[in-house]
Amino acid sequence: MHKHAEGAVLEKTGTEIMADGGVRSGASGLERLIEIGLALSAERNHDRLTERILLEAIDIANSDGGTLYLRTEENTLKFVIVRTGSLKIAMGGTTGVPIPFPGVRMYNAETGEPNFNNVSAAAALTKKTINIEDAYTTEGYDFSGTKKFDQSTGYRSQSFLCIPLKNYSEEVTGVLQLINAQDDDGKVIPFSKEVQRTVEALASQAAVAIDNQNLIEAQKALMDSLIKVMAHAIDAKSPYTGGHCQRVPELTKMLATKAQSATEGIFKDFKLDEQQWYELHVAAWLHDIGKVTTPEFVVDKATKLQTIYDRIHEVRQRFEILRRDAEIKMLKAIAKGKNARVERKKFKDKCEALTKEWAFIAESNIGGEFMSQDKQDKVKEIAKQKYYRYFDRKLGLSWTEAKLLDKAPPPAEGWEQLLADLPEHSEAEYNLGEVLNMCIMRGTLNDDERRKINDHIVLTIEMLNDMPFPKHLKKVPEYAGGHHEKIDGTGYPNKLKGEQMSWPAKMMGIADIFEALTAADRPYKKAKTLSESLKILSFMKKDKHVDPDLFELFLTSGAYLEYAEQFLKPEQIDKVDISQYLQKPNTPPPTPANSPGAATKTQAAE
């Protein structure tokens, strides 16, 4: 048995490498290289790949140790793996032990001259193997650092084999360095030509494997950056929702981590491998990609009359006109000899009525969790008041807006209602009618705008289905497209029931809702406290909109608090008694549709 380093042992019988799956018993040198090449090409973990390259080379050459360097963009050879069997040194790779040595410069930092004094740098610069019988007697290379190491450890560095790793383009990507070849009795000997050729063949395979992995990692990094750029672009569209596409992935992965850590219950078998974690990562970052098509004035609609600006200012001016008309009417009456005291009382009463009506209309514009039918009727009654318009409102319009007036062309001047649903309010996809919008029952979105908001998830699914995801990312559309589904089948767009949904999709649903409830950057609502948000989620659990087991995990694992401490404002984090929300026998029936909880839940979904 030949030991390379503590924690890294390869067992060898003849040409058989056991334990690490390298080679079968009796394999020839060529067969062994083939086996090693296949193993290297199949390895996806960078640390395991580089570590295996060095250990295989050490074993083939029967050397006491070695180092694997990788070239950086700054033309430095970075120590990646270091092993010395007799000294029990094992650093880098899967050991988790950091390598304290500075990288080897290929060029002088001051003059820019090639560094041929260092043997590993020289091998990289010349692209040729350097085989040294004895470091203490050879000339042309600076081994002062090696000798200093030997003095401090009692080691004797003797034979060196430095092989440049070259990729398809003949570019040097690293250096494989072996030290102190040994015979069967453990005596240090030079590296033979036969061993050199065999290790060079391995180095060639290793260079290709590293290059392939680097290309894969570069593609993954590019994809990650494109995903995050898209998410940032969606957040940047609105000054109010910035961060949503970044926070939802964090909470989704937090929930998945808690589920994977469970040792009992429904989540004890929930496991995600490395590729599945990446699949969830991609899906979470792209869950709102469809919003790139949603207009900002819909996403950011803070009040009922807001479009690109808040039209409540127009309505206020009409109230001003009514007040001024009332004042003019009073003055004219007094001028005609009517009782001044009576006319002033009429004017005062009218002003008080207008003030109250304006305050009611202004408050109604804010939107809320529920607007009763009585209040809607009051809006319609106030809207019937009229003022006289003297100027032609057909002038100064775009051709598209002017075309809408063809349905019912208004006169150049005349009486108009205080609030109205006019022909020009029916634009393309949206109805901008003032009375219609002012009577929105919940929140600030009318049916057209709500439909447009909901369409973002349909577009998300369509866009993701059009992307040629590789096999290990095929579930991205399903994960990302399911965060507005409800386990009772009343969600959108596909009305999936709980058993039709995956755990990652359900996790993303809770993450999306909780982030929206607690977010402090929404113009249409104030940020809710931790206790308020969990109460709303509990109503959604009772109504079978979110998964009860996942909601309970969210609470008992402490995920809700971890997220709060990381993303909520201090004043939002209040005390919560989660025991009231945990599943118990004889659970009460779901909240009725007209209850305060249901109203809160509906507003939260927006």
Image (cartoon, grey):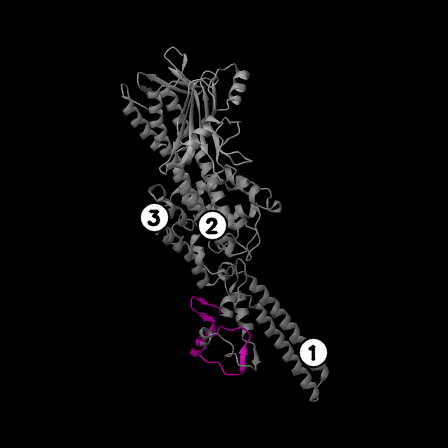
Mark 2 against mark 1, which lies toward the viewer?
A: 2
Q: Residue 468 carries which label?
A: 3
Sequence-first tag of 3 and 2: 2
**Image position of 372 with respect to 7: above or below:** below
What's the CA distance linking mark 3 and mark 2?
Answer: 19 Å
* Residue 166 place in picture, x, y as percent: 38, 33
* Residue 383 place in picture, x, y as percent: 54, 73
Q: Which mark is residue 345?
A: 1
Mark 1 secondary-structure assignment: helix
Sequence-first tag of 3 and 1: 1
User: Are the residues tagged 2 and 1 within 8 Å (C-beta)?
Assistant: no
Count of numbered circles on the image: 3
Q: Residue at x 53, y 48 (%)?
A: 533
Q: Residue furthest right?
A: 341
Q: Which residue lies furthest to the bottom in this view?
A: 336
Mark 3 against mark 1, which lies toward the viewer?
A: 3
Q: Residue 229 carries which label?
A: 2
Residue 20 appears in view: no
Instruction: Check disc 2: other Cα within 10 Å, few if <14, some if 14-19, many if 20+.
Output: few
Magenta segment range? 403-432
421 falls in the magenta region: yes
* Residue 348 place in picture, x, y as percent: 68, 76
* Residue 414 place in picture, x, y as percent: 53, 83
User: Are the residues tagged 3 and 1 within 8 Å (C-beta)?
Assistant: no
